[in-house]
Amino acid sequence: MKILFILEGDLDVRNWSGTTLSLYNVLSDHGMKVSPLEIHLPKYIRAINKWKRKVSNRSGDLSRGRLCMDYRRNRIQKALCQDDFDAIFCVGSIDASAIPENCGIPVYYYTDGTMAIMKGYYSEFSNWDFQTLKDAEDAELIAATNAQKTGGGILATSQWAADSFIRDYGVKRSSVYVVRIGANHMKEYKSSDINRIISDRIQNIKSMLRILFVGVDWERKGGPDFLELCRMLKKKGIHYHADIAGCTPEIPNELKTDVEVHGFLSKANPAQKKILDALYQHAHFFILPTHAECTAVVFCESSAYALPSLSYQTGGLGSIIENGTNGFLFPLNNPVNMSDWVNFILMLQASPKKYRQLCLSSYDFANHELTWKSVGNKIVKIITERGTHAQQS
């Protein structure tokens, strides 16, 4: 089976935290002949976007405008003329919206959200100008229509996103699939290794509780809430150590002795990846109180380390974290109250047996549901069962 694999940017570990590369690899691993098409917009488009952000109090983005969509469409058309592809696979909706009309090939695309749910959810979209929002909405609708009318499908990483395609864009339920995301570039552990890691954690959980935060966008990812949790643990007299990776926030003086900031750690850098591996291994809880999230790969990664995850019930996280299986999702209240989080942590700290079980079920859930092998199996099954260009013609 020949697949044209279309993506924005370079096919490397930096693209969508490694997710794009993982998608390409799992399709190739299943014996498909996958031809990547990297879309790089002309430099002058990026220059104009940068200029618009400087001169306007609203953010403009030309990347979904007519000029850029025509550019993508021409690139895709040229690629389609070079081989007889059986299917088209796009990472995100933007390239799926640029598929030439009447191409006659099933279009599939993998995405974690829709413009309908993100424009009022992520704060950055609130500053987009009218034309940028319109272009984005138009592209979303065209992409969904292309996938449906060509006999392809939309692969959404959560039920939250899948429901939006059905509700907001009129896509038939039979054309939308929930396909979770997988953990990227993880160190593989045997069951014996995991049992040792869990035993080491339990041995230290009462003397020194360790919590971990990994995120680049400190504010959106709930960094201030994380620090509030630290304050409450300190107030209760709990001996704890908090590690923060991915960003370099300012830590209040009263917490500096208990909170360590590691900054951004790249998985592509062996030395930095080793540090990140150690942080996941030694932590007792992964805590990311994010206020807005489509799908966060870090929750897949924490589960792969048998590390329970705590976050808010928001966005698509309900498809990644199952309460009592690989962590717990708390209601997102205003004002924020971290008391329930603290009580949950202290309950498990006092019960090593329950904590061990949650760690083991986190690992099992990751192995069965949150690996790229399981994701690949599902994607290939969808494509083969729905049929390909060769089978339909």
Image (cartoon, rainbow, N blue to C red):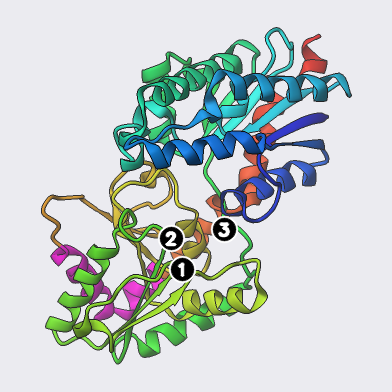
Residue at the image position 81 percent from the left and 9 percent from the top: 393
Please say whether residue 124 is one of the residues in the magenta stretch: no
Most frequent secondary structure within the magenta stretch:
helix
Residue where numbered disc 1 is placed: 360
Few, some or many residues within 10 Å of mark 3 (<14, 14–19, 20+): some
Residue where numbered disc 2 is placed: 216
Which of the two discs, 1 and 2, labels the residue nearer the N terminus? 2
Which of the two discs, 3 and 2, labels the residue nearer the N terminus? 2
**160 sits left or right of 152 in the view:** left
Position in image of residue 234 (x %, y %): 18, 83
Residue where numbered disc 3 is placed: 367
Q: Magenta region: which residues?
A: 338-358
Please say whether residue 347 is one of the residues in the magenta stretch: yes
The kind of residue tagged 1 is Leu
Q: Is residue 124 above or below residue 262?
A: above
The kind of residue tagged 3 is Asn
The image quadrant where one finds the N terminus is top right
Task: Please count the marks in the image.
Answer: 3
